[in-house]
């Protein structure tokens, strides 16, 4: 495959999740927000800037994350199909020569680039949507902060401990035990 064909395939794989999530984000904006904008006579560019884009941003960033993942997956696949130079050629040559160290280097390179781009997108998301990021310290002094997740209350209103790879939050009483 030539470079133009690879770019086209990557573009198509990234375009679809972004468009679908952006459309879904606009459709999920609450009707009272549209009614308030109409009452305040917000139209044109101001309508996009103050109503549509802020309301759809969480879904837009979800689409961007999915597009980023699809782009990297498609990039690796396109490189492996018919690469003459670049990462695909290195991985193909390493596979043919049965050179696992070089394959591992290629895989780590792809993983590192993908991780850096995901972290960069997360950084941009925090800057663009400051209302979405909430510190756990503002929720309750009863919780000890260990990483980055907010506790989710159960139906009876008592927050539960949450864990995730590298991140966890638990009540202070539980933290004293562990």
Image (cartoon, rainbow, N blue to C red):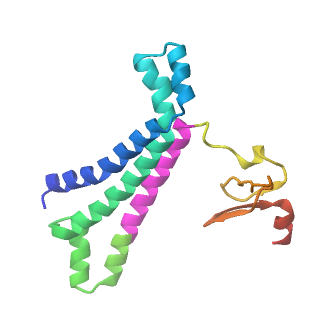
Q: Residue at x 22, y 63 (%)?
A: 78
Magenta stretch secondary structure, dominant = helix
Q: Outermost residue toward the top?
A: 41
Residue 125: image x %, image y %? 51, 42
Magenta stretch: give its range.
Answer: 108-129
Q: Residue at x 52, y 20 (%)?
A: 37
Residue 47: image x %, image y %? 45, 21
Residue 166: image x %, image y %? 62, 65
Report the side of 120 relative to 144 (left or right). Answer: left
Please state which of residues 24 and 134 is positioned toward the viewer in this rendering: 24
Report the side of 112 relative to 103 (left or right). Answer: right
Residue 90: image x %, image y %? 24, 72
Please state which of residues 121 and 46 is positioned toward the viewer in this rendering: 46
**In the displayed structure, would residue 104 be above or below residue 135?**
below
Q: Residue at x 54, y 38 (%)?
A: 127
Q: Outermost residue toward the bottom?
A: 98
Magenta region includes residue 115 = yes
Q: Quadrant of residue 84?
A: bottom left
**Quadrant location of the N terminus in the rendered image:** bottom left
Q: Outermost residue toward the left?
A: 2
**Quadrant location of the C terminus in the rendered image:** bottom right
């Amino acid at each position: 495959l030539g470079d133009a064909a690879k770019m086209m395939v990557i573009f198509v794989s990234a375009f679809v999740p972004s468009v679908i999530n952006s459309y879904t984000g606009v459709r999920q904006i609450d009707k009272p927000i549209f009614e308030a904008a109409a009452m305040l006579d917000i139209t044109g560019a101001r309508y996009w800037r103050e109503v549509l884009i802020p309301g759809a941003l969480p879904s837009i960033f979800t689409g961007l994350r999915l597009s980023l993942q699809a782009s990297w997956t498609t990039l690796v696949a396109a490189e492996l199909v018919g690469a003459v130079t670049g990462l695909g050629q290195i991985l193909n040559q390493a596979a043919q020569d049965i050179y696992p160290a070089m394959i591992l280097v290629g895989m780590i390179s792809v993983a590192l680039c993908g991780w850096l781009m995901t972290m960069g997108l997360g950084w941009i998301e925090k800057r663009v949507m400051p209302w979405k990021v909430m510190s756990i310290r503002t929720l309750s002094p009863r919780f000890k902060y260990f990483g980055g997740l907010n506790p989710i209350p159960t139906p009876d209103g008592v927050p539960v401990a949450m864990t995730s790879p590298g991140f966890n939050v638990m009540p202070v009483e539980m933290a004293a035990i562990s």
